Amino acid sequence: MGLSLTPVMKAWGQTPIPKLNLQQALPSLSNFAANQVATGEVTLDGYDLFAIAAPALTQQSEKTNTSPIRERIKGIEDTLKRIANSNLDPSKVQVTTEIDGNSNLPVIYVNDQYLMTVTTLDAQLQVQQPERWAEQLTPIIKQALIRAHQERQPDFLMQQAAIGTGIVLVMLVLSAVIIHWQKRLKQRRERIEREILAEPTIGAQPASEAADTTTAIATIQQQRTKQQHRDLKGLQTRFLHLTQFVIWIGGMIFLLGLFPYTRWLQPLVLATPLRILGIILGVYILMRLSDVLIERFLSALSRGNFLYTEASQRLELRVATFSRVFKSGAAVIWVVIGLLASLSVVGVNLLPLLAGAGIIGLAISFAAQSLVKDMINGFLILFEDQYAVGDVIIVGNVSGFVENMNLRITQLRDSEGQLITVPNSSISVVQNLSKDWSRVDLAIDLAYGTNPDHALNVIRHLSEEMYNDPEWNSKMPEPPEVLGIDELNHTGILIRVWIKTLPLQQWAVAREFRRRLTLRLAEADLTVGVPQQSIWFRSSLDLEERFDSDRPATKHQRAINNAATNLSRDGRQDKE
């Protein structure tokens, strides 16, 4: 990158001439305004010699596509090349100046051959008098011609060819070594990716099927460590690609500069597109490097021994969230810096742009108020630790496992595997089902004929038995609490049990407790309560009359019904 951004070399044996600002250097330009003057560099064999000036294009010259400054530069450079390619004797090179009688301007000759006229604009460009500037140009031109003659000698060309051959061999050896390293890094990265794919993905499981918290945290740490190694190998691979690119580009630029016939191609290779490409590659590498550094820093923080177990587990979940936010923020910063650097390379003045950035930002904030609200609310959610990646939350009418989160959105994975995206600005009330600890709220309905004391003893014994089971004890920090009879209704009696569990373990513990409870109720001959309803009638005759009224009666049936009715009436009269 440094080689690709290196400016073109100056002339051999020459003190660089500063390029002055026309607004400061040209207070009076002989009937020309500063914006009507064009400047350019005279070069020989790819080296800058000196700057000259000429009137800028007029409307008539623009139509003919002619430029006075380009025509003048071409004439001077062609003369210098013709002299350098001739049988020039370095000891007899004479560069002299004479005052032209018609224009009163100094004229430079090389071995009595006309080279150029030092104009008033040329001298004013250097804030000097024409005669003095012409005297300063004579040694510069003489040294440039001597250097050009020496570089065209066979001995020098053979020496440069040997140097070029050595550079090509070094480039080939370095490329072979880099390719070998790239293959090894690729194999290691593929092996790590296979190991990551072979492990369970915690974030992809439904909320009701989340794994044990300790196991989940350990799995997340292992996956993050492997992802760090994978990202590091990927960063090294990309750095090797960039190194190989720089080696070949830098070597090509150096090879072009070895010979006077190819040195003029250096500015083309170091043109603006190549510099912008170098900036893009640099931004990409810096983004990957920042990702690796963020992961390393946050991982070191989450693995500190100064936190107790529950805090460390919670911090691990927060680290996964902050990691993604920091990575996206760093990527935005690097992209903005790369964009500003590219504009600077193109030639855009950044000071007015930066001054107007505040006004543009204010206008964008008014035009995208919802986006600003999303980011502010997302920052508050992270700062207050309302939830993090790995929690199970309920937001409005949706719920699920927090799979991804940044300053703008929160993505949930529900029990059906659907990915739900919620803007942070729409989150006002959050129910976090997995922060610090969880609870199973179990309601058990038993029939009316159940002995309450016997039922409570059975449930308490079952709770103690499950709490003492080593497989489930690690998921329950406290023994289950049998609250007692919580309600009486038409179904029967309702007994409520609370079971405190580790985060994300309430569903697994509840399933196992219900399974054991079903078997234990069957052994204790306890029945589950069912809804009951009683219907009362005044007499059996009313029931029979209602039954008979619902269907057509035959003649024999009607006779029996009438007789029964008469007997009933006679019985009531006798009783009276």
Image: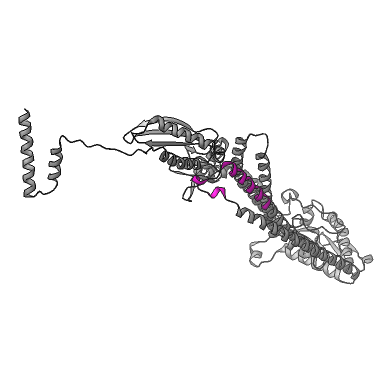
Q: Which quadrant is the C terminus positioned in?
A: top left
Q: Which quadrant is the N terminus positioned in?
A: bottom right
Identify the residue shown where x is 58% and y is 44%: 216
Residue 203 painted magenta: yes
Q: Residue furthest bottom?
A: 87
Q: Relative to the observer, which residue lies in front, 15 or 502?
A: 502
Above or below — where is 335 with respect to 172? above
Above or below — where is 3 with respect to 410? below
Pinpoint residue 94: horizontal percent, then vertical percent: 91, 64
Q: Relative to the observer, which residue lies in front, 94 or 399?
A: 399
Q: Relative to the observer, which residue lies in front, 3 or 10?
A: 3
Residue 54 painted magenta: no
Pinpoint residue 253: horizontal percent, then vertical percent: 78, 62
- What secondary structure predominates along the stretch shown in magenta? helix
Q: Quadrant of residue 46?
A: bottom right
Q: Relative to the observer, which residue lies in front, 123 or 139?
A: 139
Identify the residue shown where x is 62% and y is 37%: 312
Q: Is residue 175 among the parts visible in the rendering?
A: yes
Q: Is residue 102 among the parts visible in the rendering?
A: no
Give the residues drawn in magenta, as a range: 201-230
Apparent side of residue 351 relative to residue 251 in the rendered image (left or right): left
